[in-house]
Image (cartoon, helix red, strand yellow):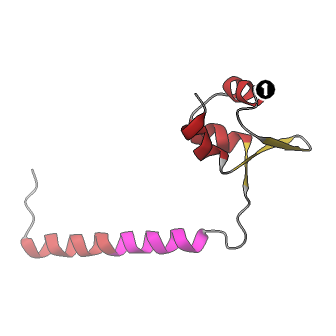
Amino acid sequence: MIIIAHDEWILLLEKQDEIIELLREKNFASAKPGVRSPYITAKEFMSAVRICRSNFDKLVKAKKIMTLKKGRKVYVVAGEVERYFREVV
């Protein structure tokens, strides 16, 4: 157990608030400005809905989710994540 004086405790809390605020500012500053794509990669979709590649392939084959292939990359419309949880069983 550590005993800290009240003044030191308040100072510690204030410093923590400063650190949290700086981290929030840094997070906003590092966000990429610009247009957000209406598509996500297959890997991002699988991560978002917590499924493996084989289950993803089964959903695509059964036409439960719509995909777009561009070169070697497979993309999914970002709205499919929400639709997956509403409709796909």
Q: Position of residue 74 (x, y in %)?
A: 81, 41
Q: Position of residue 22 (x, y in %)?
A: 43, 74
Q: Is residue 23 magenta?
A: yes
Residue at which label 1 appears: 61
The answer to whether 30 appears left or right of 69 in the picture is: left
The answer to whether 72 appears left or right of 57 in the picture is: right
The answer to whether 24 appears left or right of 86 in the picture is: left
Q: Is residue 20 above or below residue 48?
A: below
Secondary structure beneath dot 1 equals helix
Nearest to the observer: residue 65 or residue 44: 65
Residue that appears at 73% across and 40% down: 42
Nearest to the observer: residue 19 or residue 24: 24
Q: Is residue 54 above or below residue 45?
A: above
The secondary structure making up most of the magenta span is helix
Q: Position of residue 21 (x, y in %)?
A: 39, 74
Nearest to the observer: residue 38 or residue 23: 38
Kindly indicate the quadrant of the structure image that contains residue 57: top right
Residue that appears at 30% across and 69% down: 16
What count of labels does the image hold?
1
Kindly indicate the quadrant of the structure image that contains residue 50: top right
The answer to whether 20 appears left or right of 79 in the picture is: left
Dot 1 alpha-carbon crowd within 10 angstroms: few under 14, some 14 to 19, many 20 or more: few
Q: Which residues are magenta?
A: 18-30
Q: Is residue 88 magenta?
A: no
Residue that appears at 60% across and 69% down: 30
Q: Position of residue 31 (x, y in %)?
A: 61, 68
